[in-house]
Image (cartoon, rainbow, N blue to C red):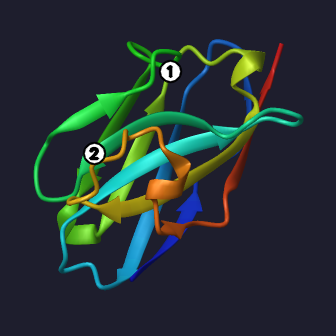
Amino acid sequence: QVQLVESGGGLVQAGGSLRLSCAASGRTSLDYYMGWFRQAPGKEREFLAAIRYSSSITTYGDSVKGRFTISRDNARNTVYLQMNSLTPEDTAVYYCAARSVFTTAPMSSLKSYHSWGQGTQVTVSS
């Protein structure tokens, strides 16, 4: 398994940007899909983006296409989520997660991810 730790959250004004980081440790020599999710108060956890650890294959949720970009730095065992043009509706706890590349469930399937970070809070003020 792999252990994940998110960082980079905080308070930002509407229209601003943040870059979240997800540092992986443990069995990082294996190939994974790394995903970013978020959960706002009273709402279900929402899929944002995913990237395959060994390649540049990416997938995005409809709500963040064109504003958020997922990337990875294999040398640092870190996955990033660059978030631009933030609005108060982006306020949530952001989580990264890992799943096997052999899983056939949709990238948005929460149950398909076997490792989760503790989350980092992002608050966007109007």
Which residue is pictured at 42% across the width and 48% down the height? Answer: 35
Separation of residues labelled 1 and 2 (CA atoms): 18 Å
Q: With respect to residue 115, does 47 lie above or below?
A: above
Q: Is residue 118 left or right of residue 6?
A: right
Which residue is pictured at 20% across the width and 64% down the height? Answer: 74
Mark 2 lies on residue: 51
Residue type for callout 1: Asn
Mark 1 lies on residue: 84
Q: Nearer the viewer, mark 1 or mark 2?
A: 2
- Crowd tier of the residue under label 2, counting other residues whose Cα lies within 10 Å: few below 14, some 14–19, many 20 or above: many
Q: Quadrant of residue 26?
A: bottom left
Which quadrant is home to the N terminus?
bottom left
- How far across and how far down the image is residue 42, in percent? 89, 34
* Residue nearest the observer in this picture, 27 or 74: 27
- Single out the residue that lies furthest toward the bottom: 26
Residue type for callout 2: Ile
- Which circle's residue, 1 or 2, is located before the other in the chain? 2
- Single out the residue that lies furthest toward the front: 104
Q: Is residue 35 left or right of residue 121?
A: left
